[in-house]
Every structure is written in C-alpha cells, then in structure tokens.
Image: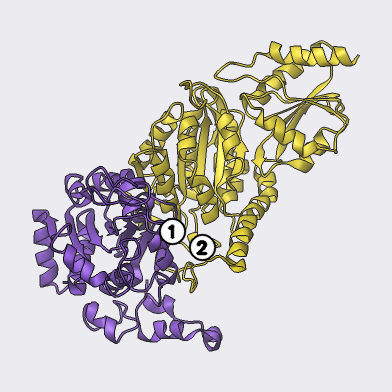
Chain colours: A purple, B yellow
C-alpha cells in the first residue's frame, strides 16, 4: 500500500474536519518519514490516533500512543482488537483495525495474517493483536496460546490493568492474589497468571513484561516485537496499564503507580530466542532499530 | 509452492482454466462418477479457486475437511490449517475472509453450537464465506447420529442457509453458494446444509464437469466493505466510537445495520433462483390435496412416499425447499395452492421446519398443516412412517 490511500478526495476537502486534514498533511507514516518513527514524533507530528474516549489520565491511552508512534510501517499494519476499554480507542485509529468478538482476537489475526501472506507474498504486512488482560488471559487464553503454538507471525500485546475495568471492576486472571474486586468480594484466591511465562513455554520468540512508565522503552520493545514476528514467529508484550479508576487513584497518579510496579509485580522480564537475538542485530545493522 | 502470483488472465494459480459459474454449472460437459458427499465436497472446492480453509475434526464432517486439506497439499487452495476448536476456526475463517479470501469450512452439530457467537459476527461483518454444515445431533446424551436440530440455531444468524438433498445437489450448491454470497449486493455468509451420514457418507452417482476448469477468484475490491489488507482506505476509521455511546445515532446505526444484513440476504433471491433453478423444487401431481414440504433427505423420503401413495390411488406432491434463508414464501404459497393436507417430515425433535412453514402460510392457506412424521437422534424415516400419517389424516377426513 502507499500512504496515498490516506489522501483526502479533493471533492470533499472543504468539508473535512481539521484533524483529518492534519492526518493527511502531518502524520508520521513510514513511507514519508526521514528517520525511523518513534516517541520523539509525539511532540510535533500528527499522530495516527486523534483523540481517545477513555477516562482522563488513563495510562492505556498513553501506552497506545507510544505503540502507534513506534509501529515500523503503520500504513501496512493491521491491529486486531478485542472487547473492553481498548475497544473504545480503536474507532479513533486511522489504520485498518478489527473488532470482532471478545476473546477471539488471536484467531482472527491468525486468519488475516495467513491470507495476507498468501495474497501479498512480496509485501510486508504486520499484524498486531492488542487486547486487555480479560481478553488475552481469561476468555481468549485458548486462542492466544494456540496462536503461539502454531507459530503465527503476529505480535500480541496485552494491556494488563489487572481487572475487568469496562464492565465495572471485576476480578480477572491477571488480578494479584488477595485483591478485593467485584466477583472476588473476599479477595482473589489464586495468583496472578504469569502470561509472559506462558508465552515462553508456548513458543513465543520474544516475551517482555514491562509497565508503560518509560515511553521510549515501550516503543523499543514494540519495534523489536514487530520485527521479530515478521520474520520468525509469535512475539508477546505484557504491558502494565493500571486502571486508576478501579484502584482509587487520581488522574495524575497513573505514572507513579507504574513506576511503583516497575519494582514490584512488573519488574522487567525479557525472553528472546537466540535466533531472534541474531535477527535483531541484523535489523540494527540495517537501521531498522 | 503454489503462489497466487502464478495466476494469469485465463488460468488460476493451480493452472485450471477459469470459467463463469454458468459455464461450470450448466454448460460444461459432465461425466458420471460414483462418490460420497465428503468426496464430492473435495471435487466442488477443487473447482472453486478457494484461497483459504480452516478445519477441525468432528464426525461426520471430518472426511470432507481432510479432503479439503488434500486440495491444499495438491496446490489448489492457498492456505489451510487445523484450528483449535470450532469457535477458533470460525474466527480464523472470519480473519481469512476479512483479509480478502474466498474461504470454506465445514462443521457438524456440537461444533456448530460451540462456534455460535461467530455466525452473527460473520453476517455483521458481511463476509461471503461458506460453511458446509453436515448436520448431526447435538448433546446431551452424546450422539453422533444424523439429526438436523442444529439448523434451527442458525436460522436467525443473518447467514443465508441452503439445503442440499443428495450428493449431486451438494456439488452444485456449494459452487453456486460462493457465487451468490459474493455478489456485491448480497455479500453475506452462506451455510450449505446436508444431512450428515445420509449424504456425507453415502456413495451415489454424480455428474461432474472436468476438473481442469474452475471459478474466477473472489475479488475483495468489489465488496461493499473494504478488505482488511491495508490496500484501501480503512472502512472503520470513525471519529466517534458509536458502539459505547448511549444515544439515538448509536441505536439507529446498530438497528439499521441489522436490517441491512437481512436485506442483503433477501437480495440473494434472484441469484439463487437462477443458480439453483428455483428456490423450491416440486415433483408429483400438480393438483394434489396431499402435499409434503421438506428439505434435505426428508424430501427424498417424501418422494418415496409419493410413489407409494400413487400406487394406492392417492395423489400427492413433494415441495422441496432449497433455500431456508431467505425463506421461499411466495414459491411455497404457490406450490401448496389447493392442498388440503400439508405434511412436514423432519429429522429433529422440535420441528423447526414445521414452525417455519406454519408461520409462512399463516392466514394464507386453508390446508391442515401436520408437522409429522418427526424422527430424531439418528432414527431413520421409513416410508411406512410417512404413509401412516397420510392415511390416518386422509381416512379421518373422508
């Protein structure tokens, strides 16, 4: 594809909202970028996410921006989403995105990726799954892991807020043990599911756990994950994006919560296969990283 | 390795000459073969230039799914794999179709129910994929026997539903199905049903065109919604997330889309009429007072009953429904004109076809609608059972 598909039909230009015109004139597409896209673009370039409809100060909205600015080739990237808070942001994203059902995101992404490889064998088409912890670890666990077993060439990102936030604050598999949430009125009785470890044993080429406290780190991990998935096989990013509403924090406290958890439940975890390590070195040599 | 790019103007990627559906179904010379329903699915798909298929084992459809896999190994199908379960498979099929593929899958009974959430999603996504449903009973108690109760669960999913009687019809119908489902003004999923075992495992004579001809490939750029392939502007670039908004616009959007899916299904009528040679097929005495309305192998048994009744001097007629969604209301009404008794023989416990027919003919027909005989759980439907119902009703009437 070329970025030309994001050009406004001249006939409609005069009735287009300012943000669409901005998107055409000032967005950071790979095809028009002079250097690799990244976090530094956030300050002066038009994003491919215009605005969001999440709660004020929600760390998810920031994390999504970091991810979108770091996509190697946004104009040839398809993001498959699931139900939950993340699905509120997707209608604003100026890329091909899919919301299908709750929990089937990795199955849909598998189908898309396989057919894109069949239809466009000579083109790069990145497929990314982005879903919450309920979608990834509870209702969709089977489909998430099975896509890893099958070595689907997709990147799976879990926005872990440790709770079913959009339905009103219920316990999820990712909630830490002991936490009182709805449906766990006496506190959660089992441990947080170590999804980043399941990703490793299930065959991911790359699995990283981190918080969204450091934008450049999120961007780097995203880029590495997408590049590895393109060539070698499934990659997984487990990203802490706390629900400030459900854990009783103010709009300006999300960052501090993530910084706290950098030292606790979300201490850095990084797994990479030797093949992927070698491949990343090649990518670096080619200037892709 | 087979490559899509090997396709030329005349030949598809496996080297078959591409022809129109009319040519394939009606004009190409045919030769006689002897095969099962599962085997004929392979023959049909071989001639359909299919991009993708995803499979999962469940009796009685497994063999058809294996044979589609063989087509992939032979280079006729672009991509094929075994999914994790039917819910996953139907989502994978959706992903394949969203990315611009012609896709086929198969399932049966419990698999259909496991996958159920996907079917309204399919129609809501307006993907023209094909599900070949080889109907079997649904649990519990555990059963693998023929029974078509599962079809009743599919009726309101927004998918088109066609029903084939035998191996020959299965071949022709599954080819026509892609063509009709992919019409830009239709563009909804299609479910082609046969009765498991009775058709999937029964060897019959079939007339097949040569296998060096096949349909033209699916053109995703003629679709009413853009494919998810980053080659066209994204269709889901909305400035407002209508889904979660509680306002009139969001309600109207959802409501009108659901109407549109059903309207799209309705718009398939003229195409189905052409490719299936009518939404219903009738046989027997045109002015009969005894009429059987049936689909699938039940219509085959009704035809046997018709022959027996003729010997007894009782005129009867069989109306075989070939499309269930859209339902052939006008054709049915015309076909039952003059009927005194309408019998609906069925292979399920609830009588979903009886309900469909009764609703369709409500206040339009004077006939006595009798939802019998009804067998389930794998029981066969002997002609005697049908005759018993007819003779009881007719003798009572006389």
Image position of B392 (left or right of B174): right
Spatial CA span between label 1 and label 2: 11 Å
Q: Quadrant of the C terminus of chain A?
A: bottom left
B196, B276: nearer the viewer? B196
Question: The residue tagged with tag 1: helix, strand or loop?
Answer: strand
> Same chain, marks 1 and 2?
no
User: Which residue carries the number 2 mark?
Assistant: B243
Visible in this render: residue B311?
Answer: yes
Q: Quadrant of residue A124?
A: bottom left
Question: The residue tagged with tag 2: helix, strand or loop?
Answer: helix
In this view, the mark in front (1 or 2)? 2
Judge whether A202 appears above or below B251 on screen: above
Q: Quadrant of the N terminus of chain A?
A: bottom left
Parent chain of label 1: A
Q: Quadrant of residue B30?
A: top right
Image position of B38 (left or right of A124): right
Judge whether B308 appears above or below A220 on screen: above
Residue A68 placement (x, y as % from top left) = 30, 71
Residue at the extreme bottom of the image, as rendered: A14
B63, B215: nearer the viewer? B63
The numbered mark at residue A99 is: 1
B152, A29: nearer the viewer? B152
Residue B275 placement (x, y as % from top left) = 65, 44
């Amino acid at each position: 594809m070329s970025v030309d598909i994001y050009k406004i039909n001249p006939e409609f230009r005069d009735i287009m909202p300012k943000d669409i015109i901005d998107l055409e004139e000032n967005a950071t597409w790979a095809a028009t970028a002079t250097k690799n896209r990244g976090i530094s673009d956030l300050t002066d370039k038009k994003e491919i996410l215009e605005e969001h409809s999440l709660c004020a100060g929600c760390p998810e909205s920031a994390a999504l921006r970091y991810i979108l600015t770091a996509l190697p080739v946004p104009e040839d990237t398809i993001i498959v989403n699931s139900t939950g808070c993340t699905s509120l942001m997707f209608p604003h994203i100026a890329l091909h995105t899919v919301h299908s059902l709750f929990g089937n995101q990795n199955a849909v992404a598998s189908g898309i990726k396989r057919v894109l490889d069949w239809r466009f064998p000579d083109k790069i088409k990145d497929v990314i799954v982005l879903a919450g912890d309920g979608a990834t670890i509870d209702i969709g666990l089977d489909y998430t892991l099975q896509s890893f077993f099958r070595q689907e060439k997709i990147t799976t990102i879990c926005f872990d807020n440790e709770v079913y936030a959009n339905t009103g604050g219920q316990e999820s598999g990712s909630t830490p043990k002991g936490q009182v949430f709805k449906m766990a009125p006496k506190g959660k009785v089992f441990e947080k599911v170590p999804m980043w470890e399941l990703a490793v044993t299930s065959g991911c080429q790359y699995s990283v756990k981190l918080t969204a406290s450091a934008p450049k780190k999120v961007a780097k991990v995203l880029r590495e994950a997408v590049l590895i998935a393109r060539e070698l096989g499934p990659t997984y990013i487990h990203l802490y994006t706390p629900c400030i509403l459900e854990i009783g924090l103010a709009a300006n406290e999300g960052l501090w919560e993530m910084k706290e958890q950098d030292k606790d439940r979300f201490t850095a975890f990084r797994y990479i296969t030797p093949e992927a390590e070698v491949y990343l070195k090649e990518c670096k040599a080619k200037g892709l990283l | 390795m087979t490559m899509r790019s090997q396709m030329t103007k005349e030949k598809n990627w496996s080297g078959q000459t591409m022809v129109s559906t009319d040519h394939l179904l009606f004009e190409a010379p045919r030769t006689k073969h002897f095969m099962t329903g599962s085997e004929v699915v392979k023959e049909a798909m071989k001639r359909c230039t299919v991009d993708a298929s995803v499979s999962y084992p469940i009796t009685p459809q497994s063999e058809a799914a294996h044979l589609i896999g063989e087509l992939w190994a032979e280079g006729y199908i672009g991509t094929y794999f075994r999914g994790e379960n039917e819910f996953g498979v139907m989502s994978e099929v959706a992903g394949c179709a969203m990315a611009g593929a012609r896709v086929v899958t198969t399932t049966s009974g419990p698999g259909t129910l496991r996958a159920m959430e996907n079917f309204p999603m399919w129609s809501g996504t307006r993907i023209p994929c094909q599900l070949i449903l080889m109907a079997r009973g649904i649990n519990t108690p555990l059963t693998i026997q023929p029974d078509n109760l599962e079809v009743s669960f599919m009726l309101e999913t927004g998918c088109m539903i066609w029903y084939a009687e035998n191996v020959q019809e299965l071949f022709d119908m599954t080819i026509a199905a892609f063509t009709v489902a992919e019409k830009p003004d239709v563009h909804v999923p299609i479910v082609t049903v046969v009765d498991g075992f009775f058709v999937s495992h029964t060897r019959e004579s079939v007339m097949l065109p040569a296998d060096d001809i096949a349909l033209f490939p699916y053109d995703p750029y003629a679709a009413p919604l853009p494919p998810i392939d980053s080659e066209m502007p994204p269709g889901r670039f909305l400035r407002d997330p209508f889904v979660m908004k509680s306002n009139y616009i969001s309600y109207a959007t959802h409501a009108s889309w659901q109407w549109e899916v059903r309207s799209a299904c309705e718009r398939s009528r003229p195409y189905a009429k052409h490719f299936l040679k009518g939404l219903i097929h009738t046989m027997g005495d045109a002015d009969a007072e005894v009429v059987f309305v049936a689909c699938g192998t039940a219509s085959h048994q009704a035809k046997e009953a018709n022959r027996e009744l003729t010997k007894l001097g009782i005129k009867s007629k069989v109306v075989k429904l070939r499309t269930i969604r859209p339902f052939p209301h006008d054709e049915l009404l015309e076909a039952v004109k003059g009927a005194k008794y309408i019998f609906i023989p069925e292979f399920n416990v609830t009588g979903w076809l009886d309900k469909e027919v009764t609703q369709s003919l409500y206040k339009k027909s004077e006939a006595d609608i009798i939802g019998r005989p009804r067998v389930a759980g794998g029981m066969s439907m002997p002609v005697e059972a049908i005759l018993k119902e007819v003779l009881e009703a007719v003798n009572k009437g006389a």
